[in-house]
Amino acid sequence: MDGTVVTAIGTPNIALVKYWGKRNSEINLPMNSSLSMTLNETLNTTTSVLFSDDLKEDRMYINDELQNIRDSANEKSVFAARALDHLRMLAGAKSHALIVSRNSFPSSAGLASSASGAVTLVYAASNALGLKLPADELSIITRQISGSACRSAFGGFVAWHKGNADDGSDSCAECIAGKDYWPDVIDIITLVSSAKKKISSSEGHAITVKTSTLYKTRPPVAEERVNRMITAIKERDFETLAIETIKDSNNMHATMLDSYPPIIYMNDTSKEIMMAIHELNNDAGRMIAAYTFDAGANAHIITRINDKEQVMEKLGSIVGNFIVAGQGDGPRLLGDNASLISNEILSR
Ligand code: DP6
């Protein structure tokens, strides 16, 4: 088969100020700006892409399962297909793509598999087409597959500016501080549940915007919080970073609960973790750690390397599994020997 296989690796990000609520769900334009930390390759997605005139259609495998990427019932697939078409248009290419992608962690369990999946797909496919996209263009194209994924186009601390343009041309992420600026800030992920969430985040965004009265107060509050966070990061002020992180997670989950029907992603273990972190901080008389929850029950504990053991000791009686992730650098290309496209897959 003609064509060259390009393989890339990308990672999730954890939002410290959350994206929740869209003003346009076709191209994922958010109601408010958000801010995150890109994680290192402890959790990752690896994706290989081949464009070839010998392929009769686009084919995509995620974790060995063939996806129907033109399935109109699956919004993420439709968005991925649209991103591929967009990249082909930019490159003036017509060939179909074979995509093989693998996550190193459970999908749809609130560990941002869609973020690392989307950014890695766009990065690998754009490189396979010979497009050397700058990170902001990569971010904008990725945003259209999954909003939060646009932040994974950059490393370190990243702000996604909501933008004002109707076409989304200014709704793009930006690196606030690279991964080496404040490297002692880490994320300890506690695996509370690996079950697939019942309400996808895409559905959740819409239900909350439509039904929650509490939500109406959120966008301006989150917008101001992003600005305070940017200052805290520049000043390496952990106290502010931790307090704002906790408040923002709780604010987002409050609007979820205020939705009708209510959306509840956290479970009793998540709440036990929250209270244990408050106890830890109170006992120490300083902010040792913050918790934050995405659309799932798993807790992300934001702390500093020197306080890692204390956090794990405190949470050890509640949860058994920890994944410790530092900050990462955004997606990168891997060598030929990392290709996931085997002869067996080619011959299918
Ligand atoms: C709670 O990015 O998954 O993780 O744009 O529909 O793909 P879509 O939504 P998604 O929403 C993520 C929501 C969040 C908060 C965040 O990461 O900012």
Image (tube, grey):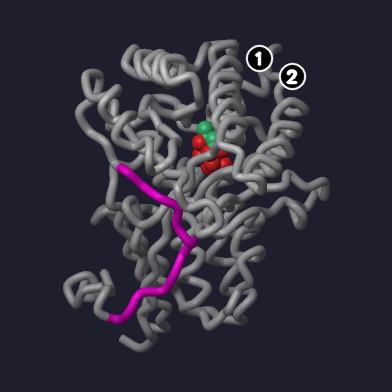
- Extent of the magenta region: 324-336
Foreground residue among 274 and 140? 274
Residue at image coords 57%, 15%: 254
Q: Is residue 35 visible?
A: yes
Q: Is residue 337 left or right of residue 107?
A: left
Tell which quarter ligand 1 is in: top right
Q: Locate residue 225, reporting x and y percent.
A: 70, 32
Marks 1 and 2 sit apart, C-alpha to C-alpha, by 7 Å
Q: Is residue 118 above or below residue 278?
A: below
Amino acid found under the numbered disc labelled 2: Lys
Residue type of the residue flagged with mark 1: Ser
Image coordinates of residue 199 in percent, x first then y, are 44, 26
Residue labelled with disc 1: 212
Residue 5 image offset from top left, x and y in percent:
36, 79
- The percent coordinates of residue 162 (x first, y second) are 73, 44
Q: Residue furthest front?
A: 285
Q: Quadrant of the N terminus?
A: bottom left
Based on the picture, tell me whether residue 325 belongs to the magenta stretch. Answer: yes
Query: Which residue is at a point 28% across and 74% down the rendered structure image?
Result: 339
Q: Nearer the viewer, residue 14 or 198?
A: 14
Residue 216's mark? 2
Which quadrant does the C terminus fall into?
bottom left
- Residue 155 forms part of the magenta stretch: no
Query: For residue 205, which quarter of the picture?
Result: top right
Marks 1/2 in contact by CB < 8 Å: the verdict is yes
Q: Which element carries disc 2, helix, strand or loop?
A: helix
Against 86, is 183 above or below? Answer: above
